[in-house]
Image (spheres, rainbow, N blue to C red):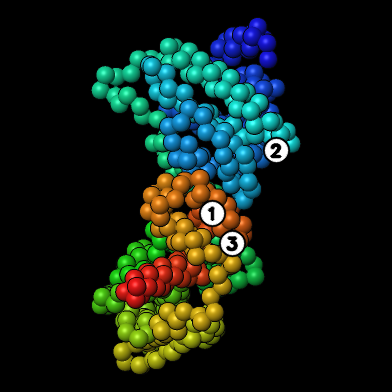
Amino acid sequence: MEPVELFIRAVDLLDAPEGRHLEACSTAIAELVPHRALVELSAAVPPIRLVGDPETKAAFTPAVLADLVESAGGEPLWRGGATAAGRPYRVSVLRAEPKRGTASVLVLVHDPAVALDETEEIAALQVVGALWRLLATHRAGRATPASPDAPDDEPYSARLAAAAGAQVAAELVQRQSALVKAMLVALRSSRYDDRQARSEATGLAMGALLDLRAEEQVRRGLSGEPVGEAFAALLEDLEPVVRRAGVRLEVDEPDDGGDVPLELAGLAAAVSTEVVLLALDRDAVTSLRVGWQVGEELVLRVRDNATTGFDPAGVRALATRVAPVGGTISVEVDHRLGATATVVLPLRRALAVPEEVPDFGLSARELDVLSRVARGLRNREIAREIQLSPATIKFHLVRIFEKLGVGTRGEAAAVAVEFGLVGKAARGQASAMASISTNQSGS
């Protein structure tokens, strides 16, 4: 590009209206570096701006961008790869740090249809970097001076975290909106009587609660839930329902039984709720006692003071629901004291680990990396723990995503927890350490 033409593009870039600089930048560098999208990360509001191909923009979520920023570190120019929405992309990250104001980052997603010579591309990216620094300095000069007490550099990292949280909140709102609509459909359907409609709506709600709880457990890298916490969450859901029915609720809290598998805790909560709803369907009920006991089995009991039995169809439906895990349900009626429903869920069967656990063809090193992803570590933390470069960790993650058939770190962690891959990695590390120890003692 001729110097005069470059100067004209720089003037056009600086002269762009506020809020339109990224579009102007994309136009200015289109011939220099063909690209699918540009992303700007800064301490401004909004902290993330995107222009370009809609599909590419949608793929580069705050979580993906946070990984890129971490990989790039503080380098003025970083070139590498990224996996977004399950697809590989070639990206360049350019950082501008004006003497005044805060740093800003430009993420350039290259056009895969255009391949430049490496030397030519680096030279072009250096020009783009110079334009980006010029723009950053220009905008810093027009910005309101910061408070003397403000940190010198509160970059995109904190803003990215906030943006990621906002994205998660938006996704939750969307999912809960769909849940409410599904519950309304169930409650209004002419195919159900009142009891069936309540049962269907309750099942939808409990399923959604279990999904949310499971996501939180995966984020924390856990596969179990303390039985006391699961029971407390159940009571929190039950209390408003029982109170509106005008019924007194008493509880038998479980002793400290340690953790129960997450899936079993969710099933126990859902079944307990459905038993309570069956009990409340009888007009004679004025008091309920709900309790859990933990031993070799998780035993759920719901007692009431009504002297009539539970709806047989409802009991059969619950029996069908708990049968896949080896569970049973029984109802006893004492015509003086009331009715008791007892559900037994075996813990040992639920806790048993299958002898054949698929490994998805992951190597020992890939299992090692995956186990740390499931713990919530970022690339640089993983690299530091296993003494590899962040670029090598990113390469391993691309291979892991391909083998697992996933597109995000969260999905990879979920697969790792579901199939026991984290435990397999730990066993492999222990075996390797034992082998090293044996070899050393024998030498």
Q: Secondary structure at mark 2?
A: loop
> Earlier along the polypeptide chain: callout 2 or callout 1?
2
Q: Which residue is mark 1?
A: 396
Q: Are marks 2 and 3 in contact (CB under 8 Å)?
A: no
> Looking at the image, is mark 1 or mark 3 nearer the viewer?
1
Residue lying at 49% horizontally and 61% vertically, measured from the top left? 365
User: How far apart, in angstroms, are the residues tagged by discs 2 and 3?
Assistant: 24 Å
Count neighbours of disc 3 (C-alpha within 10 A) and say few if under 14, some if 14 to 19, many if 20 or more.
some
> Could you say which is closer to the camera, residue 187 or residue 179?
179
> Earlier along the polypeptide chain: callout 1 or callout 3?
1
User: How far apart, in angstroms, are the residues tagged by discs 1 and 3?
Assistant: 12 Å
Residue lying at 55% horizontally and 64% vertically, measured from the top left? 362
Q: Which residue is mark 2?
A: 112
> Earlier along the polypeptide chain: callout 2 or callout 3?
2
Instruction: Identify the amino acid type marked 1.
Output: His
To which quarter of the image does residue 178 belong? bottom right
Can you name the residue that lies furthest to the front here?
Answer: 443
